[in-house]
Image: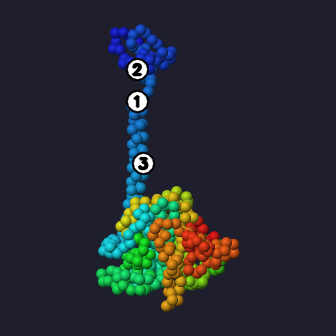
Amino acid sequence: MTESAGSAPAEPDESSEGGVHVEDNDAGPVEDGSAGLVEDSSAGPAEPAGPRPRRTRHWLRWTALGTSVVVLAVAGTGWWFYRKLDGNITTDNAAAAELRTYEKDRPTPVALDAQNILLIGSDSRSGKDNGKYGRDDGGSSRSDTTMLMHLAADRKSATAISIPRDLMVDIPSCREADGTRSGAQFAQFNWAFEFGGAACTVRTIEKLTGIRVDHHMVIDFSGFKDVVDAVDGVQVCLKDPVDDPQAHLKLPAGTQTLDGEQALGYVRARHGIGDSSDTQRMERQQRFLGALFKKVRSNGVLLNPAQLYPVLDAATKSLTTDPGLGTLGDLYDLASSMRSVPTEKVQFLTAPRQPYSQDPNRDELVQPDADRLFERLRDDEPVTVEPADKNDGTEDGTEDSPDDGTIASDQGAEPDPTFSGTNAAVGVCE
């Protein structure tokens, strides 16, 4: 059919040249001087060529909608995980209130950008799966392990000092769980946690060291096991087999990876391993925590969400903290501030100690070595930590290392003190 000039003109299809495109299905395009089109009679009306803006707009709309749904789903899942992890943390508001009561008696911070964090491993038998480690006597507990970690203001080092649980110290009057107050007394250090929980332990540490404690964390047996399991265990090397029924630990000699249950027995064992001393037990704890720290910082954990989430879930569920570390954001900020600390500068040592003169089964500090260590941390000065056997007296004129946790220095001008210990780069098997 031919459309004449007198017929209603077809709506022009605009091209990039501003003209009219006419297409014949058989013979190709035909132009006549009018604005009309010539169509093949055997075919339907010609479909205008060129872009299809409506269909393109629909595609873009669906793409944008799909992208939005994915983003919202990811954000919603992330928010759910954040809320869950954040809700896992228990905040110790009672300890915070007790410490505020005695604010005037507490040390004044010296290095404002440094952080001193008290890490307390509770031996409480209450709670899930903790009863098999001993009788739960009404929920009372003592600090099985206590470390004071100093994070330097420049974030170039972190030094953790183990405080012997049998160290004889002055424990102040503390508020007990039933609201009564204990009397001030001279007793072994781990009783402070039993008398008045974290607040009493913090005040005892501050009185002992003169160091202001900025934050504290308490972790129980189950929490420690769960964290080790979440990183798929930690490797240790044993020269001799271990059999300690009290710690529920039986291991062959050699290199092996400990799961959470075995790791807990390993860091708690005092019998059937080494010389059965608490000093060697603390050294074993330090090396194990260094190896655990190194594994958590490895790319296999931090860059793997499937492995990182169980670690965070286990850690947050087991933590009781002061309000300053009571949210996931607070803990993240603390962890982020440690990213720049080299592994070899994450140091562990024990407060210089020796058998207590009145009872060889208890400890006392070695002075002036202990005060020199506490002063350096208080003033945010570097602390040099070396293996106890590094200076063996055969090459540089130094004497053999004493048993008090210090390493003897050269004669003459007094150098910076060096303390025996280890670091996270060494690990358990070196």
**Image point (34%, 9%), residue name:** 6
Whether residue 371 is visible: yes
- Say above or below: 290 vs 81: below
Task: Nearest to the eye among marks 3 and 1: give it.
Answer: 3
**Image point (51%, 89%), residue name:** 357
Residue underneath mark 2: 13
Instruction: Tell me which amino acid carries mark 2.
Output: Asp
Which quadrant of the figure contains the C terminus?
bottom right
User: Which of 156 and 61 lies nearest the eye of the viewer?
Assistant: 156
- Whether the residues at callouts 3 and 1 have beta carbons within 8 Å, the answer is no
| Relative image position of residue 134 (x, y in whole percent) | 46, 84
| Relative image position of residue 190 (x, y in whole percent) | 44, 81
| Relative image position of residue 17 (x, y in whole percent) | 44, 17
Left or right: where 250 falls relative to 324: right
- Say above or below: 245 vs 98: below
Of the residues under marks 2 and 3, which one precedes in the sequence? 2
Tell me the SS state at disc 1: helix
Q: CA distance from mark 3 to mark 1?
A: 26 Å
User: Which of 275 and 24 lies nearest the eye of the viewer?
Assistant: 275
Q: Quadrant of the rendered structure where residue 48 is? A: top left
User: Which of 336 and 351 lies nearest the eye of the viewer?
Assistant: 351
| Relative image position of residue 193 (x, y in whole percent) | 40, 79
Crowd around label 3: few <14 · some 14–19 · many ≥20 (10 Å): few
Instruction: Tell me which amino acid carries mark 3.
Output: Val
Crowd around label 2: few <14 · some 14–19 · many ≥20 (10 Å): some
**Image point (41%, 12%), residue name:** 2
Residue underneath mark 1: 53
Residue underneath mark 3: 70
Instruction: Tell me which amino acid carries mark 1.
Output: Pro
